[in-house]
Image: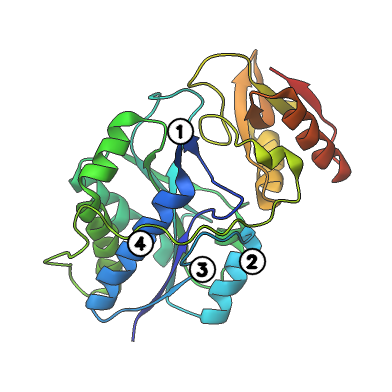
Amino acid sequence: MAKVILDAGHGGSDPGAVYRGRQEKDDTLRLALAVGRLLEDQGVEVAYTRTEDVYDRPFEKAQIANREGGDFFVSIHRNSSLEPNQYSGVETLVYDKSGQKVELAEAVNRELEQVGFRNLGIEERPGLAVLRRTRMPAVLVEVGFLNTDADNERFDGQFGEVAQAIANGILQTFGLGKVEDPSGGSSGTPGGGAEGGNTDDGWKDEQPVAGGTQGGGSGGKLYRVQTGAFRSRENAENLLYQLQLQGHPAFILYDEGLYKVQAGAFRQLDNAVRMEAALRREGYSTFITT
């Protein structure tokens, strides 16, 4: 029997992207559960890295997948950008562009494009733990931008079709055809309970603005923690991957000819200070910028 591991991105104390009160962790759980139901209806065995609002670090999610075993690992996320409504569309991340994972990524992107999303293609991200440490072909699907209103309208208004598209991409890669009559509807399943996750770091008490990794969206000064600035994008991405593997909300900002690696975007300076202290304890050279 075909088997798929579904990973709802983020969870618990890690909300992922945040925009106008909307949290990525809720969208991903709702969608992962809906996709799972559709696959099970077609005879595919499904296992989940989480079915409620709990936090596991990315490498722990990979370990869950490896224990469960399976033919494919599909991690579901929502994208985010520096400014609201800056970008729109879906893209799928892979460790490298080889093997069945590329076939799966292309199928999922193609199906989501038919729902109405812009197809942004496939991107290699070898530093992501859920792609690097899983022992089966793995993809990470960014289902539209959480801080783009048009993508959210499509995600909500066509939720059943979105879930069906991802399920169909998986089924096609298995050679099992398509879902003909999705039962997910437009409401899906609400995400989990109200458990918190790890809250050891004080800076997590304030969720980062506009995506947890990006600034913008509501005006006012935002405080970020910078960990490096490079003329080479490759060097910046190496540092970015390292931070993300450790669970930090890091991103790259291109400014004045430099690729700047920053983390967080806080309205309260105290929270940026706490985050900076946490990063320094891990050996990073940092300073706070706005």
* Amino acid, disc 1: Tyr
Q: CA distance from mark 2 to mark 3?
A: 9 Å
Q: Earlier in the sequence, mark 1 or mark 4?
A: 1
Q: CA distance from mark 3 to mark 1?
A: 24 Å
Q: Is residue 278 left or right of residue 108?
A: right
Label 3 secondary element: loop
**Image point (38%, 28%), residue name:** 87
Q: Which mark is residue 78?
A: none
Q: Is residue 51 left or right of residue 201?
A: left
- Residue to which mark 3 is pinned: 49
- Residue to which mark 1 is pinned: 19
- Percent across and percent down for residue 57 are 64, 59
Q: CA distance from mark 2 to mark 4?
A: 23 Å
Q: Earlier in the sequence, mark 3 or mark 4?
A: 3
Q: CA distance from mark 2 to mark 1?
A: 26 Å
Label 2 secondary element: helix
Dot 4: within a 10 Å radius of its alpha carbon, few (fewer than 14), some, or many (20 or more) residues? many
* Amino acid, disc 2: Glu
* Amino acid, disc 4: Leu
Closer to viewer: mark 2 or mark 1: 1
- Residue to which mark 4 is pinned: 104
Closer to viewer: mark 2 or mark 4: 2
Dot 1: within a 10 Å radius of its alpha carbon, few (fewer than 14), some, or many (20 or more) residues? many
Whether tag 2 and tag 3 are in contact, CB under 8 A, the answer is no
Whether tag 2 and tag 1 are in contact, CB under 8 A, the answer is no
Q: CA distance from mark 3 to mark 4?
A: 19 Å
Dot 3: within a 10 Å radius of its alpha carbon, few (fewer than 14), some, or many (20 or more) residues? many
Q: Earlier in the sequence, mark 3 or mark 1?
A: 1
Q: Nearer the viewer, residue 11 or 139?
A: 11
